[in-house]
Amino acid sequence: MVEGKGIKEIGWNLDNSYARLPEKFFTIVDPNPVPSPKMVIINDSLAASLGLSVDMLRSSDGIAMLSGNQMPEGALPLAQAYAGHQFGYFTMLGDGRAMLLGEQITPENQRFDIQLKGSGRTPYSRGGDGKAALGPMLREYIISEAMDALGIPTTRSLAVVTTGETIIRETELPGAIMTRVAASHLRVGTFQYASRWCTVEELKALADYTLDRHFPEAKSSENPYVSLLKKVVKGQAKLIAKWQLVGFIHGVMNTDNMAISGETIDYGPCAFMDTYDPATVFSSIDAQGRYAYGNQPAMAGWNLARFAETLLPLLHHNQEEALKIAQDAVSEFAELYHSHWITGMRAKLGIFNEELQDKALIEDLLNIMKKYGADYTNTFRGLTLGNFQDVTLFGTSEFSKWHELWKARLTRQEHSEESFYELMRNSNPAVIPRNHRVEEALEAAVIKGDYTVMERLLKVISKPYDHSTKQIEYCTLPEISKRPYRTFCGT
């Protein structure tokens, strides 16, 4: 492990609290040197919030660190062990192509994991090369930044560097490493690993660490581990509702891809829905539609049930009582999710107060959208701007009837008409990272070495609620294709 002299000037302030857990939870790893790393993109604002010098990160020492060729002072590179249900089947997993450098303590005393993704083989690589291709790393950068701008909890991307290596997948691709920033990389799968292969004492150590890191206020409750379960249930209910409200499809909601912190993590075959249809699937490996848009809330509930199972020894000394506690906590997810979702849908329609008929009003609109193949984002954008020209359903008799009911609903509020539309502008993004725009940016970057297309896209999606004229070209839909859009994990 090499430490660069100039790296001290970057501003690293690393701690290694995860490495103080029992050794079963990780393996110390040696970085895999790469031949000729080059900076592709760096997240200036994120770097500043972490207390890091952007100029120094762009230096040769900074690039060496972002590629794993050098280590900052205080780093202790390790690969985390975890397990998970992948498409319903349980298996042992772990960081097979990533290493955690440590946790950056920011000037505001916040703690964030700093992880290099695509950094090479680890003991958990399971026969893989541990590398990553440029395209998938840039995809994660784009989508995670879009999610952050939309106000959705997410891991972030600090930088992407190319490695000078050729990665063999279906074809030869340029290699890359992404630096991921996360509240933590604790997953449901981390607890599944502890439940299957660790002692109860080691499971308790993991739970205590999670409480200290994410839910310190729960430590003083009557049973902190019950509080931990309920906190995670609440966080996921809020997160999944936010996904649904903007038409985001994660694509691979395995238990190892559910973060205990409540952040969106692991952007593999993810995409945003254009035409509204609950059955929409983009992932090339999800042949049965397990993780379709409309299934995401149910899948989150299923994952949470698996999380609850891991905590049973900590919830109560009596197994039957522990099971009842777990079931009661997980059963709250559906109601919590629905509450967040319907509140968000009301906001998308400019509704401040509550009426019993609201659910029917919302569902009627969604049914009309599905019937006419309406674009999800543009439908709500059209309602927000009063622009009924470019969405097919706006000219139908069904929509006209619904529109009258909606306008009448708005009048049954004490707020002004301007406040209705202000709420809608703040709740309905004008732009999302549309699939064809993302592919356009990735193709220009990977094949042509042209990053300007991606830079323009990132600038536009950084302010999704602006509703400015500059965004209009990014609101247009792709040309009709006979082939459905497909995304890939990029491993």
Image (spheres, rainbow, N blue to C red):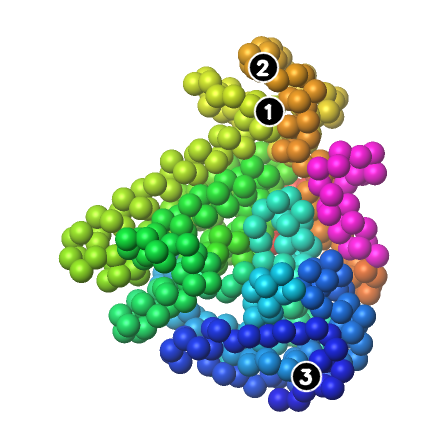
The Cα atoms of the two marked residues, 2 and 1, are separated by: 15 Å
Residue sticking out furthest to the front: 220
Instruction: State the residue position of label 2.
Output: 414
The answer to which of 367 and 384 lies nearer the viewer is 384
Residue 482, how many percent across, how many down? Answer: 65, 42
Q: Amino acid at mark 1?
A: Leu
Instruction: State the residue position of label 1.
Output: 349
Q: Secondary structure at mark 1?
A: loop
In this rendering, the label closer to the viewer, 3 or 2: 2
Instruction: Tell me if I can see residue 164 in this picture.
Output: no
The answer to which of 244 and 295 lies nearer the viewer is 244
Magenta-drawn stretch contains 467: yes
Q: Residue sitting at 61 percent across and 23 percent down?
A: 350
Q: Amino acid at mark 3?
A: Gln
Residue 484, how many percent across, how many down? Answer: 61, 45
Residue 464, how many percent across, how many down? Answer: 71, 41
The total number of labels drawn is 3
Q: Residue sitting at 64 percent across and 44 percent down?
A: 150
Instruction: State the residue position of label 3.
Output: 70
Vertical placement of 421 versus 14: above or below?
above
Q: Amino acid at mark 2?
A: Glu
